[in-house]
Image (tube, rainbow, N blue to C red):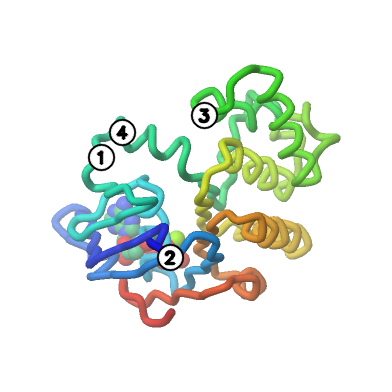
Amino acid sequence: MEPLIQLTNVTKRYQSGTQTVTALQSCSLSIHAGEFICITGRSGSGKSTLINLMGGLDRATSGQVCVGGMDLGRLHEDELARWRRTQVGVLFQFFHLLPSLTALENVLFPMTLGPLRGSAARQAHARALLAAVGLTEQAHAFPSELSGGQQQRVALARALANTPPLLLADEPTGNLDSTTAADIQQLFATTAQQGSTVVLATHDPDLVQHASRVLTLADGQIAAG
Ligand SMILES: Nc1ncnc2c1ncn2[C@@H]1O[C@H](COP(=O)(O)OP(=O)(O)OP(=O)(O)O)[C@@H](O)[C@H]1O
Ligand SMILES: [Mg+2]
């Protein structure tokens, strides 16, 4: 079977002032549909850069990033944005919810650009997602009225709103206490069991335990995995 994600000789350099930083150096890797991958490595090793490239949030300096048979480097900005909306869900360390929208409205928001048609169908799907993350009661609460763990659960429901084949997350438990982090870990494991491909960058050893494969980065290169 074709891998879902295929990176071939990917290098990413950032220009900051007169300095060039090589964040990833000639990385090649394949990830198959249904895998639950954790990316680990020291601070600055390139984890976030790798997640951003896989999600089409940033572009490689050289090499090829293919996801679901799509060569992301060949897509124009608007094509990339359209691809992103339906093919990937992304979760960050700081939940990035829209503060003026309720939990339910935050989950509904990406659906306006997704494949599901009709307000009633979207409402039902958003409520089912909130129920799946244990937030039925909080549907009408604003982010400021929710705990950090609850906000991250809303962010997870939102990332899954358009049923993306790929869920990416960057330090999703980095800002949570250990009990809430455990809930989120379980939700990722469930998401993977239900057939989504999950790729997480994390320092959290408990989260790594759930992975089907661990990739370790060192100085912008894949050192293990
Ligand atoms: N926008 C940017 N501009 C300049 N340099 C950057 C930029 N983003 C990342 N870098 C550099 O690229 C390297 C890899 O960064 P990256 O954020 O991918 O590491 P990381 O493994 O996610 O680290 P952390 O564990 O601290 O989140 C680092 O040296 C970093 O300073
Ligand atoms: Mg990072």
The residue singled out by tag 2 in the image is 31
Q: CA distance from mark 3 to mark 4?
A: 14 Å
Q: Earlier in the sequence, mark 3 or mark 4?
A: 4
| Amino acid, disc 3 | Gly
> Do callouts 1 and 3 mark residues in contact (Cβ within 8 Å)?
no
Q: With respect to residue 101, does 199 lie above or below?
A: below
Could you say which is closer to the camera, residue 131 or residue 70? Answer: 70
Give amino acid for label 2: Ile
Label 1 sits on residue:
75
Which numbered disc flags the more N-terminal residue, 1 or 3?
1
Image quadrant holding the N terminus, namely bottom left
Spot the residue most to the front.
1
Q: Secondary structure at mark 4?
A: helix
Which residue sits furthest right? 137
Contact, mark 1 vs mark 4 (Cβ under 8 Å): yes
Q: Residues within 10 Å of mark 2 (few under 14, many from 20)?
A: some
Disc with the residue nearer the chain's start (2 vs 3): 2
Residue type at the position of mark 1: Leu
Name the one closer to the observer, 4 or 144: 4
Q: CA distance from mark 4 to mark 2?
A: 23 Å
With respect to residue 126, does 36 lie above or below? below
Q: Identify the residue position indicated by label 4 in the image.
A: 79
Q: How many labels sit on residues?
A: 4
Q: Amino acid at mark 4?
A: Glu
Q: Residue furthest top?
A: 119
